[in-house]
Image (spheres, grey):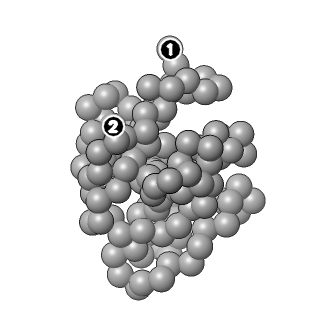
Amino acid sequence: WEGHRGNYYLFSEAKEVWGSSRTECDEQTSDLVVISDRKELEFLRNKTRDADYFIGLTYSEMEKRWYWIDKTELMGGLFTLKPKTLEYDNDCAVIRAGEVSPASCHQPNHWICEKTMK
């Protein structure tokens, strides 16, 4: 675990599908990372240079919008999300070197867990 501005982050070495990644975080009393500001994005950019990491962002086909796992909608300004390349199975998101992209929820990737310092 690595501390940064009031939170702890775990960058996985293993790879799992998105749902299993979230379960792995839950077992560590944490959840997939929700990126809330530019400083957090910059911190993650420096830590994710060489691989894709799942984050806590998913696409709602019904609403045609991206939502964080804390139920907040993705707002513009923090980063530009690359367009979905497939109409199906691209409903999760990964970060790599500060770039956030749609990704298959069923393709194994590394992941980032986040929990608040207590």
Quarter location, residue 43 = top right
Task: Please give the residue where the numbered disc 2 appears in the rendered image.
Answer: 25
Q: Position of residue 116 (x, y in %)?
A: 51, 25
Q: Is residue 73 visible?
A: no
Q: Secondary structure at mark 2?
A: helix
Left or right, 114 with respect to 26, comes to right
Above or below for 62 versus 14: below
Q: Disc 1 versus disc 2: distance between alpha carbons?
A: 17 Å
Name the outermost residue toward the front. Answer: 50
Q: Is residue 81 visible?
A: yes
Q: Position of residue 96 (x, y in %)?
A: 54, 57
Quarter location, residue 58 = bottom left
Task: Please give the residue where the numbered disc 1 appears in the rendered image.
Answer: 118
Name the outermost residue toward the top. Answer: 118
- Disc 1 crowd rating (10 Å Cα; few below 14, some 14-19, many 20+) is few
Does label 1 or label 2 sit earlier along the sequence?
2
- Of 26 and 97, the residue lying toward us: 97
Marks 1/2 in contact by CB < 8 Å: the verdict is no
Q: State the mark number for residue 95.
A: none
